[in-house]
Image: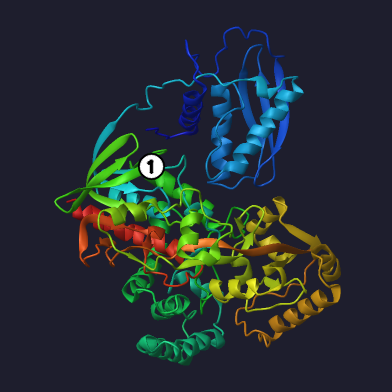
Amino acid sequence: MKRKLCSLLLAAAMLCGLSACNGSAGETPAPGTSVPGAENRFSPGTYTGEGQGFGGAIQVEVSLSADKIESVTVVKDKETEGIGSKAIEAIPDAIIAAQSTQVDVIGGATLSSQGVIDAVTAALESAGLDAATLAPVPAPSPGDMPSGEQTLDVDVVIVGAGGAGMTAGVTAALAGKKVVILEKTAMSGGNSVRATGGMNAARTKYQNDNGWNEAASVEKALTSAADYPELADLAAAVQKEYKDWFAAPNGYFDSVNLFILDTMLGGKGINDLELVTTLAENSAAAIDWLDNTIGASLHSVGAFGGASAKRIHRPINDEGKVTAVGSYIVPILEQACIDNAVEILYNTPATEILMENGKAVGVKAEGCTVHAKSVILATGGFGANLDMVAQLKPELKGFVTTNAPGSTGDGIQMAQAVGAATVDMDQIQIHPTVEQSTSALITEGLRGDGAILVNAEGLRFCDEVDTRDTVSASELAQTGSFAWLVVDQKMADASSVIGDYIDQGFPVQGNTYEELARAMGVSETALSETMEKWNGAVATGKDTEFGRTSFSAPLDTAPFYAIKVAPGVHHTMGGVKIDSSAEVIGSNGSPIPGLFAAGEVTGGIHGANRLGGNAVADFVIFGRIAGESAASYAE
């Protein structure tokens, strides 16, 4: 078992992996000390080098003495917080410990890791060295890195340090419980840290800053509800609420019932209504919990696909721009775990749920056994297990995935092994806007804020803020099965996310519509007409082509940008069956005592299609519920 509480311990863990393979014998030098027989092999000094990371150029300074690499400092980078930033912290320490660039990359931050390694390699080359000749020194055995089989006794053990796992951990700890989280990778966050949009919540005080509703959006949902007779009572309640509000408007219109209706419609009506109701009813309180308990503020409210109201709550960075929710909230959750004595054991894959007399009593993992009074599964879905995806849904064979490497379905399989039921396993979502060369998710928030999609002919082809499955299907039907996402400089000025995409080289650009069209390789005339027609629709608030009801500002401020996108595997809606208390339900229909689950490992909440903004709501709301339930069970 390897335990990481800081980047130095991670570096040592990475070096342990190397030494196990190189078979070195004899005395082991401490990290950063001279290698025997290597005196005066370097030219002392400080050297610079550059490599290409995920977010752009990474620049380093490497200081050499006569016989060793003294320091590696990253002086410039634009890597994603919570993902690439982990590599920026850990890889330099690993290189110093190994006295070599032959160190392991961090899973989930491969491009960032390799960018640091390449930058150090370039710096060493400028010093006249061939980095390939610097074999890594054997790993140390730090006293604070436990070796051998460990046994722990806690109140609550959680499998998975993503958003749901850390939220559950903090919640259980605040209830006075001793908590440990087992994380199979070298860093926390899972898919949660990759979330770019925000969190859906209804009836929050922040929605009132968004002005008046367009009646068309609510009416569109009510019209769609007519196809689902089982939702008739819910639709009637929404209609009454909206009628009463319209007669005497008080703030921005949204309701718990409308949130439920949108989610059920998005999921094609196969969602578990009880779970969806729990999600919506607890959403506003969850926004306040994030704000008041861990200091995560999601105060900017925007529009997202499938929502009849502006309901997605997003963070604002220090520059006043909307920023990605995952890279914002995950470090705050990590700190909350530290502040509340929630221990996270990294590089510790769980392999088995321990059962005794039909009750969950702990977890077996590589290198350790944890005995606990209750167990929470928060391992995420299986979107990174493309073989499993293709087996369950053959038409998705060959698609790229936006998922973190750890999302391989382990928790679902462990739950099934102890008799858990599953639901909706063949419901796998593809996201319409994925940059194919990097599998980077291009946030749906841009469409909610006014971006449009055009095809290879330079024409719009759908309502861009329709549900993800509908937009993806429309996109796949276009020439080449791809689209261009178009934004302008006004949008870029308001969004740090667009700036990140520009830094990563994703968009082409032009100072006029015609110049942008040439960069895209589409008809100049067609694109110009498309843009003018769209700007006219924004001005009138009516999209006569595709019935879009969500408008922002016209796309009329140069330069203009376009990112080439196509669908990719994004979310697995199916998973372990739970009830509204986050208890895992067995195949016999009864709860499995002591076993709880939250987040993407579960099924039933999202039905056939998840709405953007509901994943963060899911992991916060059901993470809290799982933490509360597990803590109560552990009394």
> Is residue 177 visible in the rendered structure shown here?
no
Q: Residue at x 62, y 43 (%)?
A: 111
Q: Residue at x 71, y 51 (%)?
A: 503
What residue is pinned by disc 1?
349
Classify mark 1: residues with Cα within 10 Å, few (<14), some (14-19) or many (20+). Answer: many
Residue 635 against residue 514 in the figure, above or below: above
Residue 580, x across and y down, in percent = 29, 67
The quadrant of the image that shows the N terminus is top left
Give left or right: position of 351 versus 239: left
Residue 89, x across and y down, in percent = 55, 35
Residue 171 against residue 261 in the figure, above or below: above
- Disc 1 marks a residue whose amino acid type is Pro
Residue 249, x across and y down, in percent = 48, 86
Give left or right: position of 486 versus 188: right
Q: Residue at x 41, y 21 (%)?
A: 141
Residue 40, x across and y down, in percent = 67, 8
Q: Residue at x 42, y 78 (%)?
A: 264
Residue 548 against residue 290 in the figure, above or below: below
Q: So how many labels did they put on this image?
A: 1
Give the secondary structure at mark 1. loop
Residue 597 against residue 1 in the figure, above or below: below
> Is residue 43 visible in the rendered structure shown here?
yes
Query: In the displayed image of the protein, which residue is found farthest to the left?
Result: 357
Q: How is the image coloured?
A: rainbow
Q: Nearer the viewer, residue 459 or 488?
A: 459
